[in-house]
Image: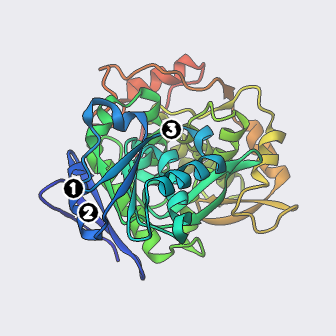
Amino acid sequence: MDGDTTDEVGHRVDVALEKHAYTVHIGSGVRRLLPRVLAGLGVSRVVVVAAPAALAADRLPDPGVPHTVLPVTDGEHAKSLANVETYCRAFVAAGLIRTDAVVACGGGTTTDTVGLAASLHHRGIPVVHLPTTLLAQVDASVGGKTAVNLPEGKNLVGAYWQPAAVLCDTDFLHTLPHRELLSGYGEIARAAFIGAGDLRGRPLVEQILASVRLKASIVARDERDRGPRHILNYGHTLGHAVERATDYTWRHGEAVAVGTVFAGLLAGRLGRIDAPRVALHREMVRSFGLPDWLPEDVAPSALVELMRRDKKGTRPGRDLTFVLDGPGGPALADVDEAVVAEVLADLPTGPAPDETPAPDESPTPAHAPAPDEATATAARHGHPAPAGGTA
C-alpha cells in the first residue's frame, strides 16, 4: 500500500513495492534532500547526469559525495541506445561500482534513458531521479519503467528499474516553457479517467501529488504490467503513434491529450460509455488548453501502422489494443482496425500546438489554465470552443 505525508520539506508519497520501497518527495526545495538520500544509500561517489534546466541558475544540488557532472540534452531524439552506451562509458570513466549511484536530473527522456543505463551498468546500480519538467514529475520519473526509442517506434527497448528515490522539486517548473507545461497537463488530464478525479482548478502541487499518489498505488499492485498497471497507458496507444509520426514535433503530453479524446470516442463507438462521458474526454483536454485534433499531413493509415507495434497488443495482425473507459472503469480492449480507422476519421486535423505562453507569462500557474485560455487555444486552430461542465 502507498501513503502520503507531509515532512519538513514538502510532501512525500511512499511507493511500497514487495522487494523495493522508495519515497517520492514533492514540493519547493526538495532537491536539497539529495545528500541525505545518498547518505542513506551509503554511496561513495555518483555521476550526476544533468539536462540544461538542471544546470541553469545554480539549481543542481551538491550531492555531498565526490561526483562527476555529465551534461546531456533532453528530448525524444536523445532517447537512444547510443546514448545509453555513452552514459555507461561515463560511469566507467568515473569509477562507479555497484555500491555507487547515478543521479538523473532532467525531463522524462533523461530519467528514462539514464534509468536504463543504471539498470545495465554492473547489472544494476541505484538511480535517484530529480525530474525537472511537469511531465516527468507527474509520470515518467515514478514507477520504474525505463526505455529508449528505435526508428521503428517509441519505448521499444527498456527494462524495469525502480529508483532509490524521486525528488520532485517544483522550483524547476518556474522557468518551464509553455509547451512543456502543457505536456505535463496532458498526463494530468488523462489521469481523470483512470482514478485521479477532476484535478482542474487545483493548485499545481496538489495536481502533482494526486497524480503521483495514483501512480504509486497502481505500481504497488502491479509493478511489471501484468494487470492493473495497463490503465496508466490510457491515451498512450494513439499518443505514441502521433509522436512517432510527427518525428516528435508533438510533445508527449500533447499527443496523449488527443489520444485521450480518441479513447473516449472509441469507447463511445463500441457502446462502452454514454455520450456525456465521451464529451467529457474532449472537455477535459480542452480545459487544459491541450489539442483535441490529429496532426495535419499524417494519414490515419500511418497511425494505424504505428499502433500495430504497441507493446500492449494481444492479437497482432487482427486487432489493435487500447485501454478504454467502460462501466467497470478502464480496461484493455481489442478493437478491429476498421473501427479504429473510422473513429480516427472523425477527428479534425491541425498543426502542432504553438509556443504561446499563458496570459500571465508564467509557466507555473498555481491552478490549471482558465477556460478562456482553453477557448483561445482552440480558436487559434479553428476549432469550436469547449463546452462547460465538470467531471
Q: Secondary structure at mark 1?
A: helix
Question: In which quadrant of the rendered view does residue 56 lie?
Answer: top left
Mark 2 or mark 3, which is nearer the start of the sequence? 2
Q: Residue at x 77, y 42 (%)?
A: 303
Neighbours of disc 1 within 10 Å: few (<14), some (14-19), many (20+):
some
Question: In which quadrant of the rendered view does residue 69 lie?
Answer: top left
Q: Which residue is mark 2?
A: 37
Image quarter hosting the N terminus: bottom left
Above or below for 219 versus 114:
below
Q: Position of residue 275 (x, y in %)?
A: 59, 48
Q: Secondary structure at mark 2?
A: helix
Q: Position of residue 355 (x, y in %)?
A: 48, 21
Q: Position of residue 161 (x, y in %)?
A: 50, 67
Q: Position of residue 197 (x, y in %)?
A: 39, 55
For badge 1, the amino acid type reads Leu
| Pointer 1 with pointer 2, Cβ within 8 A | yes
Q: CA distance from mark 3 to mark 2?
A: 24 Å
| Pointer 1 with pointer 3, Cβ within 8 A | no
Q: Which residue is mark 3?
A: 74
Q: Which residue is mark 1?
A: 33
The reply to whether residue 150 is in sight is yes
